[in-house]
Amino acid sequence: MSITTTPSDISPVTAPLSLTPSARQGTASATLAINELVAQRRAAGHDTLHMGFGEASFPLHPTLHAALADAATRTSYAPVLGLPALRQAIAAYLARTRQLDLSANSIIVAPGSKPLLYALLQVLEGDLLLPTPSWVSYAPQARLAGKRVIGVATSPDDAHQLSAAALSAALAQAHAAGANPRILLVNSPSNPTGSMFSEADVAALAGWARENGITLISDEIYAELAHGWREHISPARFYPEGTIVTGGLSKAFSAGGWRLGYAALPATETGARLRAAIQALASEIWSAAATPIQQAACAAFTPDAEIEAYVRASARVHGEAAHRMHTTLVGLDITCPRPAGAFYLYPDFASWRPTLAVRGIHTSEELARHLLDQWSIATLPGVAFGDPPDALRLRLSVSMLYGPATAATGDEHEAALWRLLAQAGDERTPTSTLPLPLLDAACARWSEVAQALA
Ligand code: PMP
Ligand code: GLU
């Protein structure tokens, strides 16, 4: 039997490519969108100072390069939770570097920590407590997982610390509004502020979560990139039964495009049930991270003096770059918490408000747009991180500004970055002598902007 239809038989409900209501509202993540916009601008001949994207951009360590080449023929699917050798290496790495008592059983590997964060939000019960500001993807992920997001206000006055009092106030307000927060997501060093928790803050935070029966997700993707004046301490040290730690290769090992992340779950019976739930979800969505990448990643997490030196040197460069930008901004009378880790700054341009208003700029989005259009500086507006639209805050990333001053071939660019890492690796040399011409030019451009706008 054949069925023939004429166009008039096709009702709107059968129209192709119809979207669900939530998909109709979705917009691309602000970080990835600005990165693509900068690429388009550059392709069209508009030189752009790229402070919009947070990518660790050092060249790949040769040991990882060789390990990936060796693993290229591993074409079989890996187990859903990850290669046993990699899970073992990550558990030992977290024991060595963060004093966490974990076995391979507690580790899950995936194509990036981003999908793992989403999987956690999908399978864990309850609404989400989220400090404001926070990384751009947490709130959209939580909403995709059907959760309500309850912001916990933080302030630049104390470098965006998270106090037990603010957490309790947010929890009480959420309950009053009919929400049921059961999860708190924290990120230290922080994207977007660069701030880090002190040991006392971490202990207080973990104690608060335990007292209130809240699951802590501790996104520690920048843990290795502390600048040296504050130590990274995981809340899992104080609250192991209720903390999930996530991390990966993207930042410390400059390999975001490898898409390799992990989650470390509590080594308890409930941790095992959580692992089974994520395993089920992963098996239906991504199956497993790419096998050659997993095999090569073992090298990153296995003790190796050279790789450890590479990570330390890259942290020193990020720290020096963030410090120079911070000094510049503060010198221009802009309030900006002193960054302690990662490669971000989160200045507040409130002091420019009157002169910006004269130019019709009232929101962080308008300020970011003005800087891109008039000054060719790409940034991200604070509103993308959950701040109110009229808070004149921007996130600046310094990590794309370590190359040579003038246009260089790919090989020249890479060679310059290796020289920079070698110099930063010599811990007797003060980081103030590191050559960062692009970053210095960026600082000079901000001074010009301030002269024109302040
Ligand atoms: N958390 C934060 C705070 C990040 O900045 C990033 C960067 N992409 C991620 C998680 C996700 O990293 P990945 O998926 O590359 O592991
Ligand atoms: N984490 C990076 C940033 O905040 C970009 C990568 C991403 O968002 O997935 O800029």
Image (cartoon, rainbow, N blue to C red):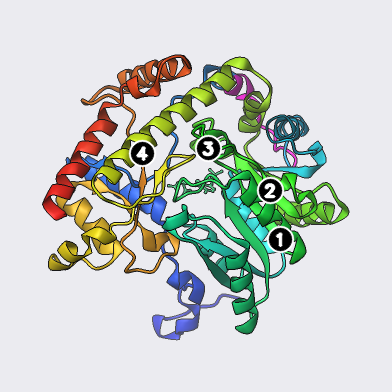
Crowding at mark 3 (Cα within 10 Å: few <14, some 14-19, many 20+): many
Q: Can you tell which mark lies on residue 209? A: 1
Mark 3 and mark 4 lie on one chain; the one further toward the N terminus is: 3
Q: Can you tell which mark lies on residue 48? A: none
Disc 2 target residue: 235
Crowding at mark 1 (Cα within 10 Å: few <14, some 14-19, many 20+): many
Residue in view at x 24 percent, y 37 percent? 442
Mark 2 lies within 8 Å of ligand 1 (Cβ measured): no
Q: Of residues 249 and 451, which is closer to you in this image?
A: 451
Mark 3 lies within 8 Å of ligand 1 (Cβ measured): yes
Crowding at mark 2 (Cα within 10 Å: few <14, some 14-19, many 20+): many
Disc 3 target residue: 250
How far apart marks 1 and 3 lie (CA) works out to: 28 Å
Which image quadrant for residue 1? Answer: bottom right
As helix, strand or loop, the secondary structure at mark 1 comes to: helix
Q: Circles 2 and 1: CB distance less than 8 Å?
A: yes
As helix, strand or loop, the secondary structure at mark 3 comes to: loop
Q: Amino acid at mark 4?
A: Val
Q: Which quadrant of the figure contains the C terminus?
A: bottom left
Q: Residue 280's spot in the image, x, y percent?
A: 75, 55
Mark 2 and mark 4 lie on one chain; the one further toward the N terminus is: 2
Name the side, left or right, on which 167 lies relative to 272: left
